[in-house]
Amino acid sequence: MPTVAYAVVHAEPPSIFLAEDLELLHRVLALEVVARTDAALLGDHAEDIRESLLEERWGDAAVAWIRAMGTGIDVYDGKSVYGHDDLPADMIGAQLQFTRLFTDGATAIESSRSR
């Protein structure tokens, strides 16, 4: 099963960015979020951010951007991407019966149905 890295930029409205891995995601954030910000909005941080970007220190650039903008970015790595082959529609009923929700209360469900 493939995985994905993603980030949520807590702007208004929030933005979500997806990438194949964390390394690529850092570059995406650098280009699509940090570098596309008007330098005037970054104030005294603009020069440090430019330098970090040119030196390919993506994390430093993002941290400086977060401080300058006051906008949080949450980054997640290694989340599974499900496909139809991973969860076939004709098997969902069989899979559900073995989940915690159904195994803990299976007896109660069956007895309430028989009433």
Image (tube, helix red, strand yellow):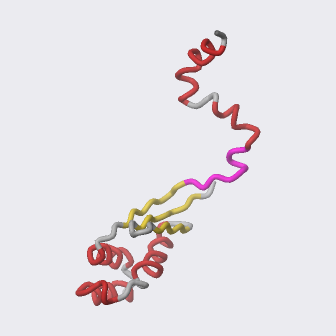
Q: Residue at x 44, y 66 (%)?
A: 14
| Residue 76, percent from left and from top | 45, 60
Say whether residue 85 is magenta.
yes
Q: Which of 23 and 93 lies nearest the eye of the viewer?
A: 93
Magenta-tinted stretch: 80-88
- Quadrant for the C terminus in the image: top right
Indicate the quadrant where residue 97 lies: top right
User: How many numbered badges does the structure rendering display?
Assistant: 0
Indicate the quadrant where residue 37 lies: bottom left
| Residue 68, percent from left and from top | 27, 78
Say whether residue 49 is magenta.
no
The answer to whether residue 55 is left or right of residue 104 is left
- Would you say the magenta stretch is mainly helix, strand or loop? loop
Q: Residue furthest left?
A: 44
The answer to whether residue 68 is left or right of residue 4 is left
| Residue 46, percent from left and from top | 29, 87
Q: Residue at x 44, y 64 (%)?
A: 8
Q: Residue furthest right?
A: 90
Q: Residue at x 63, y 52 (%)?
A: 82
In the displayed structure, would residue 99 be above or below residue 39?
above
| Residue 60, percent from left and from top | 32, 76
The answer to whether residue 46 is left or right of residue 83 is left
Indicate the quadrant where residue 40 lies: bottom left
In the displayed structure, would residue 65 be above or below residue 84?
below
